[in-house]
Amino acid sequence: MNCFDCSTLGLSSDAVAVCADCGAGICPDHARMSPRWLTYTAAINRTVVVEPPARTIRCPAYRSAWDAAANCHAAAG
Ligand SMILES: [Zn+2]
Ligand SMILES: [Zn+2]
């Protein structure tokens, strides 16, 4: 499989991962890794974060959309 984002630029790179959000193949240059914190519920419905975090790999499109959404929330105050 080739990197989807590279192909839109007319390039051809081998994909090393698959976007967890849209399923596109992504090369190391386009992969965006973020920690994904797993939790469990302790007594009295307390949510406890488990160390170390797992990971989620997504394409740049997801990251751009995420940043745009964060800006919308910031603008809305
Ligand atoms: Zn790429
Ligand atoms: Zn994606």
Image (cartoon, grey):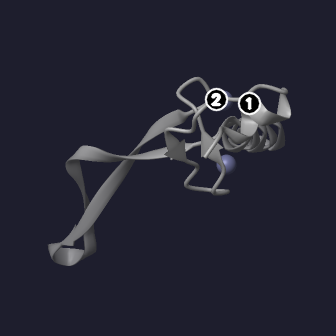
Classify 10 Å Cα crowding around label 2: few (below 14), some (14-19), many (20 and above): some
Would you say 17 lies left or right of 30 here? left
Cα separation, mark 1 vs mark 2, equals: 6 Å
Q: Looking at mark 2, is its residue's CB closer than 8 Å to ligand 1?
A: yes
Mark earlier in primary sequence (1, 2): 1
**Residue 74 visible in the current orientation:** no
Please tell me which residue is depicted at 82% across the width and 36% down the height of the picture: 75
Q: Position of residue 59 (x, y in %)?
A: 64, 40
Above or below residue 43? Residue 8 is above
Would you say 15 lies left or right of 75 here? left
Q: Looking at mark 1, is its residue's CB closer than 8 Å to ligand 1?
A: yes
**Residue 28 visible in the current orientation:** yes
Tell me the amino acid under the disc marked 1: Cys
Would you say 47 lies left or right of 76 here? left
Please tell me which residue is depicted at 58% across the width and 32% down the height of the picture: 27
Query: What kind of element bears circle 2?
Result: loop
Q: Quadrant of residue 38?
A: bottom left
**Mark toward the viewer: 1 or 2:** 2
Are the residues at dot 1 and dot 2 in contact (C-beta closer than 8 Å)? yes
Q: Position of residue 34 (x, y in %)?
A: 46, 38
Q: Nearer the viewer, residue 20 or 12?
A: 12
Q: In which quadrant is the C terminus drawn?
A: top right
Which residue is disc 2 drawn over?
A: 13
Which residue is disc 1 drawn over?
A: 6
Query: What kind of element bears circle 1?
Result: helix
Q: Quadrant of residue 42?
A: bottom left
Please tell me which residue is depicted at 74% across the width and 35% down the height of the picture: 5
Please tell me which residue is depicted at 68% across the width and 35% down the height of the picture: 60
